[in-house]
Amino acid sequence: MKSKNLFAQLKRIIRKPRHFVVPIIGVLVAVLLAACGKQSDSSNSFSKKTLNLMQSGELLSLDTAKQANLNEFNTLTNSMEGLYRSNKENKLVPAMATSLVKPTNNGKTYVYHLRKDAK
């Protein structure tokens, strides 16, 4: 008996489209107003040049010689720049170095000159 009563109520709701239209319009208006609202102060966090990283585990060390797990490697990769980087054509270009270095002393000596603004 209850299922017939429920079915009859659903039939009445479906026949009256305003039951669906009013909530849908309400949701659309709320989304529109939220999108047009004033932005909060948190949007200015990019100007502070803060790097926020999320890791799945604890960082044991940020010493490049002692990195032991993937979390440390990812953090160091995202926060430090090496001597060289790859360009769009996958060719090495100077990053912290001022130029590409060629080995001397039969390939035993490399002399790197760093940028003046390197920190």
Image: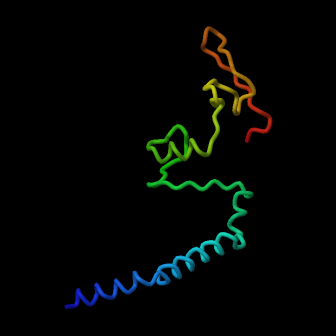
Percent x, y of residue 34:
64, 73
Q: Nearer the viewer, residue 87 or 96?
A: 87
Residue farthest to the left, as pictured: 1
Across and down, in percent, residue 39 comes to: 70, 69
The quadrant in which residue 84 appears is top right
Q: Residue at x 63, y 53 (%)?
A: 51
Q: Quadrant of the C terminus?
A: top right
User: In the image, is 87 to the left or to the right of 56?
Assistant: right
Relative to residue 35, is residue 112 depicted above or below?
A: above
Q: Tell me which residue sits at (51%, 79%) in the image.
A: 21
Above or below for 18 versus 94: below
Using the image, determine if residue 98 lies above or below residue 56: above
Left or right placement of residue 4 versus residue 96 in this view:
left
Q: For the view shown, which residue lies furthest in the right direction?
A: 116
Which is more toward the observer, 87 or 102?
87
Residue drawn at (44%, 42%), measured in percent from left and top?
68
Residue 23 percent coordinates (x, y): 51, 81
Q: Position of residue 72 (x, y in %)?
A: 50, 46
Query: Based on the displayed image, in which of its 4 quarters is residue 100 positioned?
Result: top right
Front residue of 14 and 74: 14
